[in-house]
Amino acid sequence: MSNLSPTKKGLITGVLMIASSIGIFFAKGNFQNSLQYVTYCLYIAGILWTLIDFKRRNNFIKFKDFFSEGFKCFVVVTLLMVVFTFAFLLLNPQIKVERLAFIKEEMVKTKMLTPGEINSRIDMERKFFIPGSLMGAVFGYLLIGVVFTVITAGFLWQKKNDVGLRIIK
């Protein structure tokens, strides 16, 4: 399995994340629960797998090489998760209905908006629900991927090249 490219590792990671998300949704009825962290753990594990395997297979590695490998993995995962989010929202319209009802309920509780303003905002939410969800998926998964890849790549690169010892000497 160590001969797998970072994109194939991203594909495997993304498929596992999708499977866990579907399982969590059908087990709990929504994504707003602590089991959703399992999906993020799979994401992090996929990036770790990619970077550690890359380190194991190469002798001299620059930071940019580590980042490049991680990037190839997390971009594939992000693409898969965005496609999954789009398909899942289209196949489960009740998610949108439930979310809009929750938003409306919260607006009513604040007592800061008139019924007309609430309806206007709900109409706007309805229009932008899927695009907003997709943007959230894109930016969320990219941000997590970039941050975790940079931190892990920095740690692995530093450890591989003994930067700390060179600074002391």
Image (tube, helix red, strand yellow):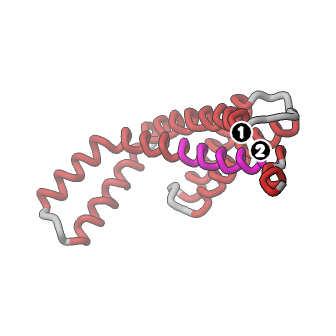
Q: Magenta part mainly helix, strand or loop?
A: helix
Label 1 near label 2: C-beta < 8 Å? Answer: yes
- The image shows residue 1 at horizontal and vertical percentages of 86, 33
Position of 122 compared to 46: left or right? left
Would you name the residue on which mark 2 appears?
157
- Is residue 157 found inside the magenta-colored segment of the image? yes
Would you name the residue on which mark 1 appears?
63
- The image shows residue 77 at horizontal and vertical percentages of 62, 37
SS for callout 2: helix
Position of 53 compared to 148: left or right? right
Category of crowding for the residue at label 2, using alpha-carbon neighbours closer than 10 angstroms: few (below 14), some (14–19), many (at least 20)? many
- Is residue 163 found inside the magenta-colored segment of the image? no
* Residue 115 seen from this side: yes
Residue type (three-letter) at the residue carrying disc 1: Phe
Residue type (three-letter) at the residue carrying disc 2: Trp
Q: For the magenta stretch, what is the residue range?
A: 142-159
At 69% from the left edge and 40% from the top edge, which residue is drawn? 13
At 40% from the left edge and 48% from the top edge, which residue is drawn? 94
- The image shows residue 25 at horizontal and vertical percentages of 56, 52
* Residue 15 seen from this side: no
In front of the other: 114 or 95: 114
